[in-house]
């Protein structure tokens, strides 16, 4: 999750990041016994928390324009400084939620168990 969050600061496209990270992390997590669906969920947590502070996000210029409506001197640093506490809070809360989800062993979705050795996993 932390790696996806860090890569998000340099690359705006979620699908491009997944295309780079998935060939490494999906097999690695499968060797650890986790399903690809759970790997995707962990990636989504890391990807989503830094969107608002990433200058590479496609809507970042629009967000700056809206902030400048209320503070004409605002720029990239102002938006990042305002949103950084929210980004950290989201990272901590989403990570706690994902860890709790995994510890409880709740399936990721219909027909998508958390672990590969689960009897619900379709071969």
Image (cartoon, grey):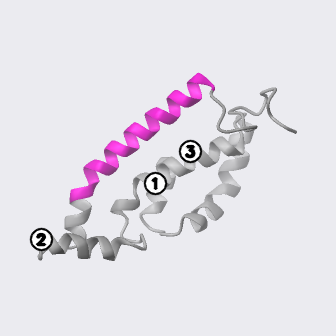
Left or right of residue 92: residue 109: right
Q: Name the residue nearer the viewer: 97 or 27.
A: 97
Label 1 secondary element: helix
Residue 82 location in percent, x, y?
21, 58
Q: Assess whether residue 64 is covered by the magenta stretch.
A: no
Q: Assess whether residue 87 is covered by the magenta stretch.
A: yes
Along the polypeptide, which appears first: circle 1 or circle 2?
1
Residue under the image location 64 percent in, 37 percent down:
108
Residue under the image location 21 percent in, 59 percent down:
81
Residue 42 location in percent, x, y?
56, 44
Label 2 secondary element: loop
Q: Which residue is mark 3?
A: 42
Residue under the image location 47 percent in, 48 percent down:
2
Residue 61 location in percent, x, y?
32, 76
Along the polypeptide, which appears first: circle 3 or circle 1?
3
**Quadrant in the rendering for residue 41:** top right
Q: Residues within 10 Å of mark 1 (few under 14, many from 20)?
A: some
Q: Name the residue nearer the viewer: 11 or 57.
A: 57
Residue 7 has which mark? none
Label 3 secondary element: helix
Left or right of residue 14: residue 52: left
Q: Quadrant of the C terminus?
A: top right
For the stretch drawn in magenta, what is the main secondary structure? Answer: helix
Asked if the residues shown at circle 3 and circle 1 are in contact, with their CB atoms under 8 angstroms apart, the answer is no
Q: Which residue is mark 2?
A: 71
Q: Which residue is mark 1?
A: 48
Q: Give the vertical position of 26 relative to 23 (above or below).
A: above
Give the Cα separation between the discs numbered 3 and 1. Answer: 10 Å
Q: Name the residue nearer the viewer: 12 or 62.
A: 62
Q: Residue furthest top?
A: 104
Q: Which residues are magenta?
A: 82-105
């Amino acid at each position: 999750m932390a790696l996806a969050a860090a890569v998000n600061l340099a690359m705006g496209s979620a699908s491009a990041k997944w295309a780079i990270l998935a060939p490494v992390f999906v097999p690695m997590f499968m060797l650890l016994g986790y399903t690809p669906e759970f790997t995707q969920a962990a990636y989504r947590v890391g990807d989503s928390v830094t969107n608002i502070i990433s200058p590479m996000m496609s809507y970042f210029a629009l967000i700056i324009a809206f902030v400048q409506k209320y503070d004409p001197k605002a720029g990239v640093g102002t938006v990042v400084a305002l949103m950084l506490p929210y980004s950290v809070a989201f990272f901590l809360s989403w990570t706690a939620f994902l860890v709790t989800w995994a510890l409880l062993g709740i399936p990721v979705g219909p027909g998508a168990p958390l672990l590969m050795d689960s009897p619900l996993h379709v071969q």
